[in-house]
Amino acid sequence: MSTGTLLAIVIPVALILAALAVIAFLGFRSRRLRERFGPEYDRTVEDAGSRRAAERDLSAREKRHDELDIKPLPGEVRDRYTRNWTEVQGEFVDRPEEAVQDADLLVTSLMRERGYPTEGLDQRLRDLSVEHGRTIEHYRAAHEVNRLSMKHQATTEQLRGAMVHYRALFDELLADGGQSRRAPA
């Protein structure tokens, strides 16, 4: 067999193998991101307009998150937050709008204490989505009702729902204990 014939066979085979490797890598990456972000993956794809753009965004979120110093809470701090939540929840009966606003402040405080930046809602959602993608929609819904309650436009049922939504993220942040999914440095 001549060198030309051999190259005519080897080069296409190598190109096909390289293409298959790229396809496998992209499939693995998509599957990993979908599993990690849960419903947030689909939401990001929809918002970005393409899977490729969404996956770049989600990968950038992971990179930023890996640079954060997310830390576990000592037991006494978790106990304090649990007591604070009980107080906020008890406030709901007499002052539901204020309770929802206090729940928002308490969740934000918990995020800050865990090491999440709290500079703006969009960035908070992006940062939280990396490890809390399955509950981040609770936070969005609660925050929207909180926004309505500040204008006295939320119904009591919406306010009750907001408390349930805040509680879902609150419990996850509190129970997570800082057990980040990244490998130790």
Image: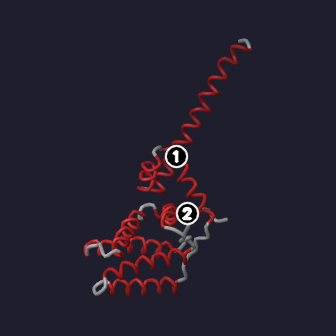
Q: Is residue 46 above or below residue 180?
A: above
Residue indicated by mark 2: 181
Q: Residue at x 50, y 66 (%)?
A: 124
Report whether 60 appears left or right of 165.
Answer: right
Query: Residue most toward the front?
Result: 151
Quadrant holding the N terminus: top right
Q: Which one is earlier in the sequence, the residue at label 1 or at label 2?
A: 1
Marks 1 and 2 close (CB-CB < 8 Å)? no
Count of number-bearing discs: 2
Of residues 106 and 155, the one nearer the viewer is 155
Q: Residue at x 64, y 65 (%)?
A: 184
Q: Position of residue 126 (x, y in %)?
A: 51, 61
How many neighbours does mark 1 have within 10 angstroms: few (below 14), some (14-19), or many (20 or more)? some
- Of 38 and 100, the residue lying toward us: 100
Q: Amino acid at mark 2?
A: Arg
Left or right? Give the position of 97 relative to 117. Answer: left
Give the vertical position of 57 relative to 118 (above or below).
Answer: above
Determine whether, in the image, residue 149 is placed left or right of residue 42. left
Residue at image coords 49%, 82%: 78
Distance from disc 1 to disc 2, alpha carbons, whole Å, reads: 24 Å
- Secondary element at tag 1: helix
Q: Nearer the viewer, residue 81 or 19?
A: 81
The residue that label 1 is drawn on is 53
How has the structure been colored for display? secondary structure
Nearer the viewer's eye, disc 1 or disc 2? 1
Residue 185, located in which quarter of the rendered image? bottom right
Q: Position of residue 70 (x, y in %)?
A: 58, 71
Check disc 1 and give the amino acid type. Answer: Ala
